[in-house]
Amino acid sequence: MKKIVLVFLLLIIWSVYTVSADTNTTLPEPNFIATPVSGSAPLTVQFTDTSTGNPGRWSWDFGDGQGGSAIQNPKYTFYCNVNGANSLIIPVKLYVWSNSGICKIESDWPGECENKTVNIILTSLPPNSAFTATPTSGPAPLTVQFTDTSPWTPTGWYWTFGDGTTSTIKNPSHSYTISGVYTATLTHPGNNDLCNWANPVNTTITVLSPIAPGTTTSPTPSLNQTATITTSTTLPPTTVTEQTTLPSVTMAQTVTATPSGFYYTPKPTVTTMKVFTSIPTSTPTQKSPFGIEFSILAISAAILIVRSQYRKP
């Protein structure tokens, strides 16, 4: 009885293996052509499926760690950085399945779907990455807008801003809060060590000391910094007017004498002086009343003498 069961099991195993082998021979077998297969990076290649067995599904591995495709006849551009080598071989693989999702098993690797491989050869380096930074200098805090301007279409970015921070978006904005000189770098990394996409590029960002409140220029930058400091001093016009008003001085002296009933009142004397530094002392001239009395007596004596002459017989 045991022998019968053992024979029955062997027959079942043999039947399954036979069916599986027959089915594997009727499954789609992958194949394709690539145009061109070599050239300078960036290199755009057209892949055309030539698989047999009427496949219903396709899976492309472009070998650079950057991309793949599930369409039948894709076009792909290789941007790999060959790290200084004269050429780089990139293996491209195609896997196919039937409409029911079954693939032909690799004979040398049981359990793995069969694939077709074609080598793409890059013969030179791709163009350098490129970006702009606006502004590249100014007082802290300084916000800089970084914009990727690489002459191709990358799908990955890695920014280092020089202050210990990084970014993986296409066009980041970064704020520098501490004065200093920083080196910002852009690379387009790959997903493995085969490709780095493009040569990195960098630029220098100069962050000056913060502007003090109430001023319009930045203080002197620290070491390795450059700055232009403008100082303007405007003195308001000054007009000095000195005006000196000199007073007018009027001096008058009146002398009255009464000899023998006669009165003499001399005409007032008026003296006007312009004073420049000081007012001088002025003494008016006076007429002596004794001279006037002597004249009157002399005249009276003369009259008496004349009268006495006329009275003589």
Image: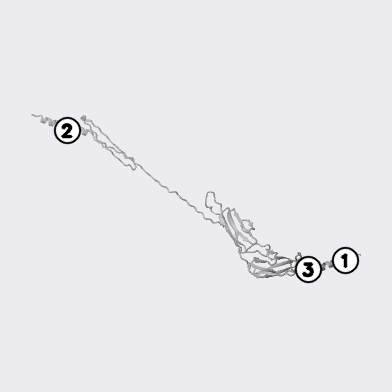
What residue is shown with label 1? 8
Amino acid type shown at disc 3: Asn
Q: Looking at this rendering, what residue extends furthest in the right direction? A: 1
- The Cα atoms of the two marked residues, 2 and 3, are separated by 181 Å
Question: In the image, 259: left or right of 190?
Answer: left
Amino acid type shown at disc 1: Phe
Of callouts 1 and 3, which one flags the residue occurring earlier in the amino acid sequence? 1
Sort mark 2 into few (<14), some (14-19) or many (20+) by Cα contacts within 10 Å.
few
Amino acid type shown at disc 2: Ile
Q: Which mark is residue 299?
A: 2
Q: At 78% across and 68% down in the image, what residue appears?
A: 24
- Asked if residue 237 is positioned above or below residue 29 in the image, the reply reads above
- Indicate the secondary structure of the residue bearing disc 1: helix
Question: In the image, 210: left or right of 296?
Answer: right
- Asked if residue 175 is positioned above or below residue 130 in the image, the reply reads above
Sort mark 1 into few (<14), some (14-19) or many (20+) by Cα contacts within 10 Å.
few
| Total numbered badges shown on the rendered structure | 3
Question: In the image, 20: left or right of 229?
Answer: right
Dividing the picture into quadrants, the one containing residue 148 is bottom right
Judge depth for marks 2 and 3 and give the one in front: 3
Q: Position of residue 312 (x, y in %)?
A: 9, 29
Q: Which mark is residue 24?
A: 3
Q: Quadrant of the C terminus?
A: top left
Of callouts 2 and 3, which one flags the residue occurring earlier in the amino acid sequence? 3
Q: Looking at this rendering, what residue extends furthest in the left direction? A: 313
Q: Is residue 223 visible?
A: no
Q: Position of residue 248 (x, y in %)?
A: 32, 40
Dividing the picture into quadrants, the one containing residue 82 is bottom right
- The Cα atoms of the two marked residues, 1 and 2, are separated by 199 Å
